[in-house]
Amino acid sequence: MPGTRGPVPVPVQNGDGDLTLQILQAVNEHDIVKSADTFPNTSQTVIKAALDRLASRSMIEYDTKDSEEVRLTDEGQQIVAEGSHEYKVWDAVRQAGRLSLKDPVLATAAAKAGQGKAFKNKWVKKDGDALVPLTDAVTDTTRDDLQYVADHRAVRRADDLKELRKRTLVTTLKVIAYEARKGPKWALEIPVEVTDLTADMLADGSWEKATFKPYNFKALGEQSPGTGALHPLNKVREEFRKIFFNLGFTEMPTGRFVDTGFWNFDALFVPQQHPARDLQDTFYVSDPAEAGPPGPDPEADAALAAMEEEDRDEESSNQPLTAPPTRTLDYAQYYQNVRSVHQDGAFGSIGYRYPYTDAETRRLVLRTHTTAVSTYCLHRLAAHPRPCKYFSIDRVFRNETVDATHLAEFHQVEGVIADYALTLGGLQGFLRRFFKKMGLVGLKFKPAYNPYTEPSMEVFAWHQGLGKLVEIGNSGMFRPEMLLAMGLPEDLRVYGFGLSLERPTMIKYGIDNIRELLGHKVDLGFIERNAAVRLDKA
């Protein structure tokens, strides 16, 4: 059976009939049908839907008529029913002959407004502390003007509108109405339209009399759902990950944004009086405010083991990645080692020599750097010391003043390399190799201070656009006070280096204000328009 499309009823708001058929009947009886007169109780949207359905078949034609109607407010309707405020004041004074200004009749807000109008019309006057009438009969022009509005939905004189609106007695309303007339394919009934031409129709000739549904070649079709787009930070992050993977690094699990002061500060040999631990620099968690002593994180251990398994070389795929741990990690002893190196000095260091507070180590903070994760992974390495390379790229939080170059949260790119007999020259050589993959050559190194690395270096590179050296990262060799407290052997040394993810992203995309890259001011169109990033290799 061929596909057909018949009339689709459009319900009338105040009835159960077919509005399209009612419009056809009205047009048949009158050459021009005005929707406001014929269907006064039907909404404009319903009327237009029915007219469009008929006009699409060329059965009718219609014009849109926009007009502005004047409607009474509630106060205006009350005046039409009872009289204006000034009339009520005059009438009360007339009946009393002399009405005290303190009379309750004059105490209402409407009466006070009416007094001014009655004075202006010279209907009453003030006589001492009372009002007296000046005339025995008046014409309530305000009520008459509003009655005209109620009857005609327009003002009698153009100047009246401004005055009546000022007194909030009327308001204007835009009205959309339609005038319908017969179209080229006029009919009293909507014909059934055939959507398919079949072999049977060709055989019996019924196609000659059939009404075929016309094709709408102008239809835009269903709007396709918007496809997702990677944020510029994610694009640059993915490029960094490729660089790390190509250099043989294993990615560390960094899903824990909240950490204790022990892993975030103490284990990194950051003294408990360091300015970075002040409230103006660090976000502390209020509920819960503390955690227990340091211990294993089974989820992080399992995730890191899985990542190391994935990174195993194919040549040794039939062998275990690592030998079984040579010893079990003793977190209680590790905690005591960290306490000793801070308070009394240990492992060849004189320490900071201050009273070490246990409560400070248990305070929960939003991690200020991903080095807290690196510390956990390096301590895990003490169970089976061996050369390894780890990296992480994730979010960190600092109590910064927000401006064009700083946010309270940003992303840190960090790498650590553990191996035997490492030297500072080896770190500089690796950094030159690493940044060369991003197109940055001619690095310069400047001595710096970090509590947990010694020696420490800031890394600079030449910026062609700015025409000067700019800092691109920080680096150093982790201190013995940090590594030996973990139980790592003395000859196993560790490089550490890091940089922000936002700075290279801003340079790559030409962004001057970091708030246009991350936060509520980000332009979604900017994210969708930019293609995948490719860091220029030197």
Image (cartoon, grey):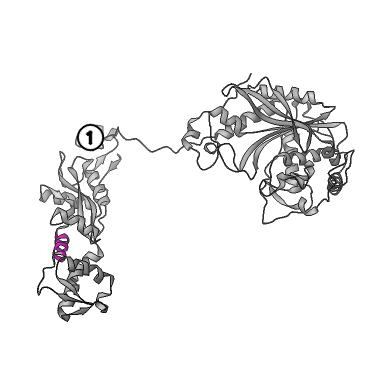
Q: Give the position of the N terminus as an image quadrant.
A: top left
Q: Position of residue 528 (x, y in %)?
A: 48, 33
Q: Nearer the viewer, residue 358 or 248?
A: 358
The correct choice, above or below, for 206 with respect to 428 in the image is below
Q: Is residue 533 visible?
A: yes
Relative placement, left or right, of 181 versus 307 is left
- Find numbered disc 1 in the image and state the secondary structure of the residue it sits on: helix
Q: Is residue 78 visible?
A: no
The correct choice, above or below, for 374 with respect to 156 in the image is above
Q: Position of residue 526 (x, y in %)?
A: 48, 33
Q: Position of residue 536 (x, y in %)?
A: 60, 22
Verify whether residue 147 appears in magenta.
yes
Q: Residue at x 25, y 65 (%)?
A: 74
Magenta stretch: helix, strand or loop mostly: helix
Picture quadrant where residue 326 is located: top right
Relative placement, left or right, of 454 versus 202 is right
Q: Give the position of the C terminus as an image quadrant.
A: top right
Q: Report the magenta residues as a range.
A: 142-151
The correct choice, above or below, for 507 with respect to 115 in the image is above
- Residue denoted by label 1: 207
Mark 1 burial class by Cα count in 10 Å: few <14, some 14-19, many 20+: some
Q: Residue at x 19, y 66 (%)?
A: 117
Type of the residue with mark 1: Trp
Verify whether residue 527 appears in magenta.
no
Q: Nearer the viewer, residue 511 or 404?
A: 404
Q: Residue at x 77, y 50 (%)?
A: 361
Picture quadrant where residue 172 is located: bottom left
Q: Residue at x 17, y 73 (%)?
A: 90
Q: Nearer the viewer, residue 99 or 297?
A: 99
